[in-house]
Image: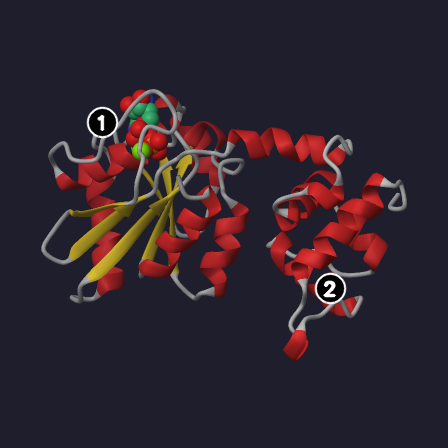
Amino acid sequence: MKDYTELVEKVINKADIILMVLDARKARESINTEAEARIKRKNKKLIYVINKCDLVPKNEIERLNLPNSVRISALRHLGTTILLRKINEIARGKDVVVGVVGFPNTGKSTLINALKGRKSAPTSPISGFTKGLQKLRVSERIMMIDTPGVLPEKRVKGAILVAIGAVDADKLKDPEYGAVQLMKTLKGKIERHYGVEPKDDPYGTLEDIALEKKIIKKGGVADTERMAREIVRKWQRGEIR
Ligand SMILES: Nc1nc2c(ncn2[C@@H]2O[C@H](COP(=O)(O)OP(=O)(O)O)[C@@H](O)[C@H]2O)c(=O)[nH]1
Ligand SMILES: [Mg+2]
């Protein structure tokens, strides 16, 4: 099983248009800001698909006001025609690859099924049912890629372990991930410590800090791995307040 963020990155790279599927009940909270930052960096088209609108009162959804969004219910096939029209508008008669990303259980597979009109992407009430990357043709011009929704549970717990120092900085297998998780929970503390501006994409912030501290590899590239380890180490030693 490939790393979740790696899979999302792969989908983003392959797609021309990316649908970020959100749960209408927690639409803003279900935005994957890391993926969002990556999509913007790569200049790909992003459409927020606010799914499960059948579960939320209409006025509540209208208050949301997300740019470039479509409100749908994949399960009830509501709003899917509007979404298809939007995709076709962007495609302008050309073949397009549409990547579908979003947190587990937001309804990615259900959406693809709805667009395709017959069962093809497996759906399940159990989060993380979809396993590999799946390519599916939904129309003559539109190819869709479904993303498996397996959140790395071990890593989620690992982030807490990193923060409390239960896992030593020097023993971290993925120090960048650890540092990024730390940055997220500390809400600007690390950025302030190093005197850099927080970015939407914490991996970008990590790069900035490394460049600022001149932690660089050959060719002047930021050594984010070494920097990340140092950040975690400093935090664990109580040197960042
Ligand atoms: N009420 C409601 N449930 C939905 C909707 N879309 C998907 N679901 C349900 O949400 C669960 C997860 O759907 P799935 O497509 O497997 O999510 P994925 O993990 O993002 O691929 C399933 O039980 C679906 O039936 C929707 O529009 N409304
Ligand atoms: Mg799925």
- Which badge, 1 or 2, comes first in the chain's sequence? 1
Residue designated by label 2: 210
* Number of numbered discs: 2
Label 1 crowding class (10 Å Cα cut-off): few <14, some 14-19, many 20+?
some
Quarter of the image that includes the N terminus: top left
Among all residues in the image, which is located at the extreme front? 171
**Residue 84, placed above or below residue 15:** above
Quadrant in the rendering for residue 96: bottom left
Disc 2 element: helix
Cβ(mark 1) to ligand 1 < 8 Å? yes
Q: Which mark is residue 179?
A: none
**Residue 143, placed above or below residue 128:** below
Quarter of the image that includes the C terminus: top right
Q: Position of residue 54 (x, y in %)?
A: 32, 25
Disc 1 element: loop
Q: Position of residue 111 (x, y in %)?
A: 26, 37
Residue designated by label 1: 76
Cβ(mark 2) to ligand 1 < 8 Å? no
Q: Is residue 83 left or right of residue 44?
A: left
